[in-house]
């Protein structure tokens, strides 16, 4: 009987491993783990550790390693299915009925493992033959020792369309095709031929050390530079990582896992004494690969090449990770010198050079800030608004709501410091932020002289009565937004005195640490004489914003309220900049100033359009 990976994963997740092992081994707490004397070999000093969070045990003495199922099969000698049934009974799961198709697939996979092992052995033998001289020269040029070549099982696929096919004919052509070692043309009467020819062959193993695929590197010129095995019964390139079988135990000793771009980087690091590295199989990191990494370490280090492609790959991985982040799941990054990969760095400076880089990884929050900060100039309100919008979009993408809020607050704090502003904590109270500008490579530097009153003003006309009423209604229904958008609310200028008084009372209450719920806000608005002001709006038209309706989805309503407040601020800053540009144009006409004035008009129209969309409830 074969059980699905999903069932086994859920069984492991529900099982408290320490409780299973504690019935056989005396365990004591050791930080976030448990330790005890290993049940698999005789020892007096504990070297056997159990990690409930990652659901595995490991002995640093004899190397025993596994999960709850493996413990029952190896320590108690239970058959696999008996072990599964015992664990399933303990956690209240029902073992699925036998699936004949899954059984057939498992039997087929077991046979294909033998075929892949035979192919790896044959490739390794070919590397020692005369025709592999150029391949051996390449290995030597890379600096790989014979021990390294043997440890990673590196081989060579000679030229010729049927060399492997002939050598492994006893395995059967169908199996060689199923393993991805042969290509069978779709046209009838065409013979199958070797997939890999004239390439250095790098075996890809699963977590149990079984060969499941190959990466073939061209020797000399030709395309593609790397040719990987296709998707097969054994090889799902998005669900495994190169070198996972060796990096997994090494990561527990090193307390870290490192992700590099390619096979050669992994091999170079291993030869330098850093065995805890893996690489994706020629693709961007997938969610499944991130899950594997997080089971090994809560903060994997991404060490990609220093060129533009490598850094973009790091950002893609960061964005893919955002929905899955949690307090115990994040990423860290190291930036290699421009144009260099780990192999280059090791050759230039040895182990010390790569250790120096890995010693100071950059947190995810900093890496995304730096990426977005460097993306565009920040000389105009629109460019700065774009930076803020991108950062908030990243924060919103984080699945863990509390962590999403913390990222949002962190980035808003930096943005406020960048634009020389201050903002309060959500829970009340007022915290001054560092004043200054964020300069690439320098961090915060002293600010420029303050802008003129005209530049800071939101326009002499101020926000109209209906829009002011909508914003204040939104704040009365969603009080948490007051602290979240404190600095933006400070900058708003209303035409109506009652609206200004109500806004100021709410901000004063936030500064004093007063609890702001709907009832408390209603009291404040009544004391400010604004209750009738808001009631007037509810009786009339113009209140179609999502945040003015108590029955709206709260998440969408608070999001739209924030967008409206920030849009009103941006509209005011654009209006002030437009007035200044018009004044300068009157004093000194130039094509450049005309262009700036036109650009500001377009930006103003865009904010007006966005407010109209929000007012319509879109």
Image (cartoon, grey):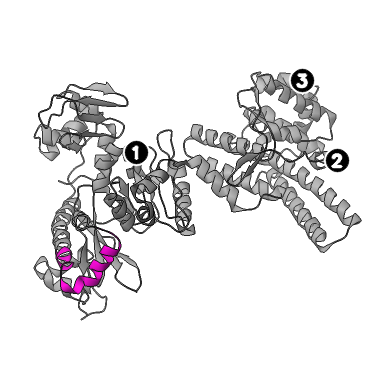
- Dominant SS in magenta: helix
Q: What element does badge 2 sit on?
A: loop
Q: Badge 1: how crowded within 10 Å, few (<14), some, or many (20+)?
A: many
Given residues 300 and 289, the one toward you in this image is 300
The residue that mark 2 highlights is 461
Specify the quadrant of the image occupied by residue 261. Answer: bottom left
Given residues 261 and 196, the one toward you in this image is 261
User: What's the distance in space between the residues labelled 1 and 2, CA to CA?
Assistant: 56 Å
Q: Is residue 517 magenta?
A: no
Q: Badge 2: how crowded within 10 Å, few (<14), some, or many (20+)?
A: few
Q: Which comes sooner in the sequence, label 1 or label 2?
A: 1
Circles 1 and 3, Cβ within 8 Å, touching? The answer is: no
Q: What element does badge 1 sit on?
A: loop
Q: Is residue 142 magenta?
A: yes
Q: Which mark is residue 220?
A: none
Range of the magenta residues?
Answer: 122-144
Q: Position of residue 281 (x, y in %)?
A: 33, 57
Residue 512 relative to residue 137: left or right: right
**Residue farthest toward the right in the current orientation of the protein:** 587
Q: Is residue 175 above or below residue 19?
A: below
Circles 1 and 2, Cβ within 8 Å, touching? The answer is: no
The residue that mark 1 highlights is 297
Given residues 523 and 437, the one toward you in this image is 437
Q: Is residue 293 above or below residue 157?
A: above
- Which mark is nearer the camera, 1 or 3? 1
The residue that mark 3 highlights is 526
């Amino acid at each position: 009987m074969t059980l699905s990976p999903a069932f086994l994963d859920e069984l492991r997740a529900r099982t408290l491993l320490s409780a299973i092992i504690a019935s056989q081994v005396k365990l004591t707490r050791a930080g976030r783990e448990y330790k005890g004397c290993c049940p698999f070999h005789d020892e007096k000093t504990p070297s056997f550790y159990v990690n409930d969070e990652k659901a595995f045990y490991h002995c640093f003495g004899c190397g025993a390693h596994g999960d709850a199922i493996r413990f029952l099969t190896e320590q108690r000698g239970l058959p696999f299915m008996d072990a599964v049934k015992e664990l399933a009974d303990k956690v209240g799961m029902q073992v699925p009925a036998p699936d004949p198709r899954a059984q057939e697939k498992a039997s087929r996979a077991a046979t294909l493992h033998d075929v892949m092992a035979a192919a790896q052995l044959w490739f390794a033998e070919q590397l020692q033959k005369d025709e592999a001289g150029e391949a051996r020269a390449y290995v030597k040029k890379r600096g790989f020792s014979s021990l390294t070549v043997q440890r990673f099982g590196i081989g060579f696929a000679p030229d010729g369309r049927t060399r492997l096919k002939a050598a492994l004919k006893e395995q059967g052509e169908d199996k060689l095709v199923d393993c991805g070692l042969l290509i069978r043309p779709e046209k009838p009467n065409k013979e199958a031929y070797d997939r890999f020819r004239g390439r250095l062959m790098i075996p890809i193993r699963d977590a149990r050390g079984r060969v499941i695929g190959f990466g073939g590197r061209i020797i000399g010129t030709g395309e593609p530079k790397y040719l990987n095995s296709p998707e097969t019964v054994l090889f799902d390139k998005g669900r495994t990582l190169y070198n996972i079988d060796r990096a997994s135990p090494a990561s527990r000793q090193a307390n870290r896992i490192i992700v590099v771009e390619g096979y050669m980087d992994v091999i170079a690091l291993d030869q330098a004494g850093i065995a805890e590295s893996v690489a994706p199989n020629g693709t961007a990191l997938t969610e499944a690969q991130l899950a594997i990494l997080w089971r090994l370490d809560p903060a994997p280090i991404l060490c990609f090449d220093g060129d533009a492609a490598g850094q973009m790959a790091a950002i893609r991985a960061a964005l893919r990770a955002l929905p899955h982040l949690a307090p115990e799941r994040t990423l860290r990054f190291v930036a290699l010198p421009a144009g260099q990969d780990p192999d280059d760095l090791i050759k230039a400076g040895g182990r010390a050079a790569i250790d120096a880089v890995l010693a100071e990884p950059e947190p995810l929050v900093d890496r995304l800030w730096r990426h977005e900060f460097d993306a565009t100039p920040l000389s105009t309100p629109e460019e700065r608004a774009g930076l803020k919008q991108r950062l908030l979009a990243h924060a919103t993408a984080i699945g863990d709501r509390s962590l999403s809020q913390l990222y949002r607050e962190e980035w808003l704090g930096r943005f406020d410091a960048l634009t020389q502003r201050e903002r309060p904590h959500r829970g009340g109270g007022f915290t001054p932020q560092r004043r200054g500008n964020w300069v690439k490579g320098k961090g915060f530097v002293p600010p420029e002289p303050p802008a003129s009153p005209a530049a800071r003003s939101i326009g002499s006309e101020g926000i109209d009565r209906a829009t002011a009423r909508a914003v204040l209604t939104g704040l009365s229904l969603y009080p948490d937004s007051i602290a979240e958008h404190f600095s933006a609310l400070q900058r708003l200028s209303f035409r109506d005195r009652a609206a200004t008084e109500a806004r100021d009372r709410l901000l004063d209450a936030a500064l004093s640490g007063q609890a702001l719920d709907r009832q408390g806000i209603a009291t404040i608005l009544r004391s400010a004489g604004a209750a009738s002001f808001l009631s007037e709006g509810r009786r009339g038209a113009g209140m179609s914003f999502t945040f003015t309706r108590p029955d709206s989805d709260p998440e969408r309503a608070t999001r739209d309220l924030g967008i409206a407040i920030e849009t009103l601020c941006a509209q005011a800053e654009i209006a002030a900049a437009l007035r200044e540009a018009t004044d300068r144009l009157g004093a000194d006409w130039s094509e450049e100033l005309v262009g700036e004035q036109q650009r500001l008009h377009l930006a103003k129209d865009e904010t007006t359009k966005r407010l109209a969309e929000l007012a319509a409830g879109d």
